[in-house]
Structures are given as C-alpha cells and as structure tokens.
Amino acid sequence: MFEVPSFADLNLWLTAPATVLALGACLLLLVDILFIPADRKVTTAWLAIGVIAVSFVVNLFTFNESGSAFLGMFVADGFTSVANVIILVSAFISVLLSIDYVKRAQIERGEFYSLILFSVSGMMFMVSANDLVSIFVSLELLSIPLYILAAFRVPDVRSEESGMKYFILGAFASAFFVYGSALVFGATGHTGLPEIFQSVEGIVADGGSAGVLLLLGAGLILVGLGFKVAVVPFHMWTPDVYEGAPTPVTAFMSVGAKVGGFAALIRLVAVALPTFVLAEGDTVTVWQQAFWLVAAATLILGNFVAVAQTNVKRMLAYSSIAHAGYIMMAVAAAGTAGVADAAAQATLLYLLAYMFTNLGAFGVALSIEKDDGSGTSIEDFVGLAKSRPRLALMMAVFMLSLTGIPLTAGFVGKWFVFKAALDANLIPLAIIGVLTSVVSAFYYLRIIVNMYLRDGEGDRAEGATEYVNWAVYVAFAGTLVMGILPVLATNLTDAITIASTAVR
Amino acid sequence: MVQTETFVMLSAVLFILGAMGVLLRRNAILLFMSVELMLNASNLALVAFARHWQQMEGHLFVFFVIAVAAAEVAVGLALIVAIFRSKQSINIDELHQMEG
C-alpha cells in the first residue's frame, strides 16, 4: 500500500530556501547557548541576519524552478519564490528593529532571534504547503514561536497578557483548522490539495452527505485561517496582542503571519476548491460569497474603529485588520473563473507594499517609544517634525502609503487589488473598499497633522538608534521605489500562476 | 463493526463540548484542557475517516496533531506559570490591562 520513496523523490533542492532557514534556526540556538556570552548578544542578531541572507541567496538560485517536493506535500513555484522574498525581507527588517529594542527593554536573550527564525521557516513552509497536513504543521511552526515572542517581555503584565490571549485564541483557531481538515478528509478521502480538487466535482454532482461534510470542513478551515490573518469576525485578539507584545515582535507578526496565512488561504481556495459550488450549474463558488461578506465587514470595522484609537500601536493593529480586508478582497476575487492568477498576483503585490510600509511605520513608533514601553500615544507625535525632521518625513510617507496615495507602494498594492475585484465583477465590494480608504485617510493623516501642524516640544526619539534608522531607511526606500517604479514589483509577479490547470 | 458515522457523531459532540469549554470557562488551565479536547475530537474523526477510506493520510495527520499539541502544551503551561507569578491568579477575566 505504501511504497518507500527514494531520496531523489524528495526533491530537497526545491525546498532549500525553507530548509536552510529551519536548519539555521536550530544551529543558531546551539551556537548562541554554547559560544555567545550574555553581553554580546548582538553577534546572535548578526548570525540570524546571516542565516536570512543565505536563505535569500538560495531562494534566488531556485527562483525560476518549479515542481513539488516531499511527495507532493510541498510545492515550489513563482508564487512561493516571491512570497519567500517578502518574508525574508520582513524578517531582516524586524531583526534590525529588535537589536537595540531588546537591550532597552532588558529582554536581551539569544533565543529571541532563534524564535524569529523558527517562525520565519514556518511562514516559508506555509507559502509552499500543498497538503492539509503540511499547512497545519507549518501554521503551528509559524504560530508557536510567536506566542512566546509576544510574551517575551516578562514580567511585564501587558506582554504576558498579550502572549496568553494570542496563545488561547491561536490554539482555538488551530483546533478549528484540524477539525475542518478532518471533515474535508472525510468527504474526499484525501488531504493533498490537488487530490481534493479532483474529488470536489464528483461530490458536488452527487449532492449527498459528502457535500455537507465538505461544506462544513471548508468552513471550519476558513475559520481557523481567518483567526490567523485577523479578519472580522475573528479579529478580536488583534488589538490587545499587538499593543502588549514588544514592538519589533508586533511589527514582525503583523506582516509575517499575514503572508503565511493569506498564501495558504489563496492556495487552498484556488487549488483545491475552485469548482466548489452549492448545487451543480451554479457559477459562483460557495466561498466567494462568504469571503465577500468577510472582506466587506473587515474593511468597515477595521477602518471605522481605527479612527477612535489614541495609541499608535493599537491604531496600527486596527489598520492591519483593515488591510487584511483589502487582501481578502483579492482572495474573494480568486473565486471567479479566470481571475485566480491575477488575484494571487494582487495578493503578493499588496503584501509586498504592506510589508515595507507597515514595518516602517512600526519602526518609527518604536523610535519614539520609551524604555518602559510607554510613549506610543498619538499625542507623542506632536512636534516631531521639529525635533526629528527626517523621521517625521518618513512617517508621513508611510502614513500616505497606508492610505494609498499615488507614488507610494500602498497605491500600487490597492490598484491591483481593486483591479482584481473589478475583473471578478465584485463591484459593490470595490466600492466599499474605496469608501473605507477615504475613512482611513482620516486616522492616518491625523498623525501627519500632529507631527507637522501642531506646536509642541517634540519627542527626542531616543529609540531611533543606528540599527533602527537603517531598518526604517530600508522600509522607506522600498515604499518609494515600489511606488514610483511599480514595474520592478510587477515584473516579479507577472508570470505567477496558481489556479488548478483544469479551470484556468 | 461500528459504523463510521457513529465515530464522527461522537467526535462532533466532543468538539462542541471543547469549544463550549473554551468560550465559557474562565480558568486558563481548563481553557487549555478544552482546546486539547477539541484537538482530540479531531483526531478521532481523522482515524475514523482513515479507516473508512482505507487511507494512511488520516493516521499520519493524527501523529502530527499529537506532536503539535504537545509542543503547544509546553508553551501554554510556561505562559500560565509566568502569569501566575505576576498576578497570583490564572483567571483570564483578570487579564484586562488593555482596553479600547
């Protein structure tokens, strides 16, 4: 029944970017404990950056290769390569942001960087996962280090609270994911996404109880992933977790967890369920209608509640919910036949733009944060243009990019997402997206107004050390270059295909 | 031979009990046990379906779920201990430093 695979069948070279990173994380943990003294933890950070760089180079070597590995559980294609780039750059910026922050917060321990690397390897496996089992394992590899990182600032009660809330809701969500997978397995007899795809049409045509199982199972899986990427109505953990966690960790998880979650989500719906309709003959897939509602609710709630926030970390948390709504719009668009590839490209472009902009914004927030974790109120930005003009200018660009003003990366991301939604005939959703963008301008511009138009002493931004500055410069450069020359980003994503060949 | 449906019904009942536990209980350790109950309900469903389809994938999945659950327990208990040290309580209703 089970044949023993040969070593060559595993196709290890294709998995090299992710495996190099996972091995590097394990090694780093050992090297850190055995060789690096407690007062020189900055070496660990540089080693972590070294591992990220090696993985990046390997990713460039395998960039144009595609195929499957680990007997079909892992798939490498253009989508994976670009998603890996996004994940690795976000990890690089997050490590740079962390180096001095952990020193200031007195939580400088070597495991910090190993945990970040473990989480990154989980994300990289997740964007390649092609089987419910591998999606689950990589989802956990992504999440468990993040639970620890969120609570890393012990004995600060807010950080512990953040870790605990994230942990309980994350474990709750994984349980939904596993039960959903079990039901999908029960309906189809397979866990591989392409095999599930082959069974779906028969199940829909049959109209029996297997269809009910599949519907329930897919629904529970989407609940599980919805928790991870924080879409309404599964978003309630986000503000507390983001506010309480150490700021570089918040920056990292606001981007990385979303890349992993959305990649798995779009691969799941585009590869396994593109033909999943309620009754034979329907043209609209079941999940497109569900995602439509989720995306609309996420956009409205995220943007409107963000207006009322006074803490910038909390404001960015609601803003990240709102941005999850825009990405959800692209994922919903993947439900229309023929649009799946464009939707996958739009998702990646949006995540790339969001990665640069959001990390930059968190970098500036971290610069004005005090050593004890306070000082991130919106009022603390008053007068920043006088005391730290360069920092204020970059923050202004990040805020404009989050709003989606032309010549910034955010505009490019929004452009492609709206285009995908219009191609898929989701016109009401696109209108909601545009209107909520207008609302978002209100709270993003308020920070610019505080920095430039209101008189105040101005924060000295003691957190803006050299490493933090470099991280923010990288994010700033990425935001502007992608905004002014979007062709550089679209060249990367142009050739990406994700949909099952049968429905393309 | 017991029918697959019976196992799936039992697993659904266990899963719902677990979910209710997470939503209604306030003690962190009990929350935690409820999550474990949900995961084990999934395991039961997986092995039942694996027997039904005569496919190994279901059994394989169960092993991964067990391993991951163990890893989660380690992290979860560490978090509970850390919280108990600073608050002398593991009632999650008392975790409300942040509001808004």
Image (tube, rainbow, N blue to C red):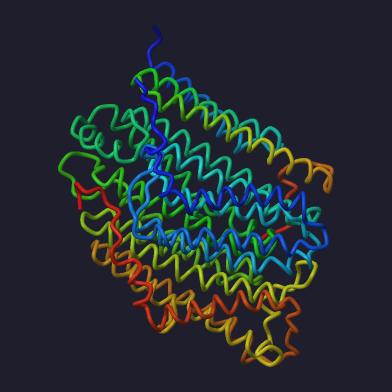
Residue A309, given in percent of the width and then of the height, sits at 61, 70
Q: Residue at x 24, y 37 (%)?
A: A198
Q: Name the foreground residue: A247 vs A164.
A: A247
With A94 as the anchor, is A187 left or right in this view?
left
Residue at 55%, 63% (x, y): give it. A53
**Farthest residue toward the top?**
B1
Residue A377, position as x, y percentages in the image: 69, 74
- Left or right of B34 on screen, residue A327: left
Q: Residue furthest left?
A: A281
In depth, the one of A66 and A331 nearer the eye is A66
The image position of residue A357, as x and y in percent, is 52, 73
Q: Is residue A188 above or below residue A219?
A: above
Is residue A208 rendered to the left or right of residue A228?
Answer: left
Q: Position of residue B83 (x, y in %)?
A: 78, 46
- In this rendering, the count of numbered labels is 0
Image quadrant in which the N terminus of chain A is located: top left
Q: Quadrant of residue A433?
A: bottom left
Q: Residue at x 82, y 58 (%)?
A: A38
* In front of the other: A264 or B28: A264
| Point 50% across, 64% down: residue | A302
